[in-house]
Structures are given as C-alpha cells and as structure tokens.
Amino acid sequence: MELPSGFPPLLSACGQPAYTNYVGGFHGCLDYIFIQQDRMQVEQVIPLPSHQEVTTYEALPSVAHPSDHIALVCDLRWNL
C-alpha cells in the first residue's frame, strides 16, 4: 500500500550527524532542521563538537554541554 504525503520533499540542512543526543545507554540523531531545497539554501553550518568533547564527561548533559541535546545551528537563505 502506498500512502501519499501532503509534505513536500524535505532536506536536512545540517546533514545527519551520528548523534545529537548522547546519554547513558543511548546515542542517536533526534534533531533536524528540515528545509525545502527549492525554497532555501544552506549558507553555513556551525560545526558540532567533536566526539571527544561530548564524551569527556561520559554523557550529556555535562559541565561543558548543559543540555542532553547538541544544538544544530545553520544560516539559511531564502531563494527568491
């Protein structure tokens, strides 16, 4: 069975990192910034912290990263 979608094709502006959530017993990518590629362009993506930075204190949150999620940050430009 095929189910039609009302959503346009979406692209993850920051790609798909190995993880955006790193807690005891789980790490995976839970966070995305979705865009319509025909309407927006990614100007730049702020680099994510290295694996060593994230795991220095074993898991998130930590002294260095006060959230259990790593922020995805990018600059986007509307296509005119």
Image: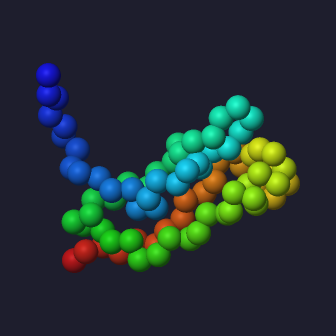
Quick check: 80 left or right of 65?
left
Q: Nearer the viewer, residue 61 or 27?
A: 27
The vertical placement of 31 against 79, above or below, is above
Looking at the rendering, which quadrant does residue 49 occupy?
Answer: bottom right
Q: Quarter holding the C terminus?
A: bottom left
Quick check: 28 left or right of 62?
left
Q: Nearer the viewer, residue 80 or 59?
A: 59
Q: Position of residue 62 (x, y in %)?
A: 81, 50
Residue ID at (22%, 66%): 38
Q: Nearer the viewer, residue 57 or 52?
A: 52
Q: Quarter holding the N terminus?
A: top left
Looking at the rendering, which quadrant does residue 76 occupy?
Answer: bottom left
Q: Position of residue 41 (x, y in %)?
A: 33, 71
Kindly give the residue lying farthest to the top in the view shown: 1
The figure's colour scheme reads rainbow
Residue ID at (77%, 51%): 55
The vertical placement of 70 against 77, above or below, is above
The vertical placement of 74 against 64, above or below, is below
Q: Position of residue 3 (x, y in %)?
A: 16, 29
Residue ID at (59%, 49%): 20
Is residue 31 visible from the viewing direction of this image? Answer: yes
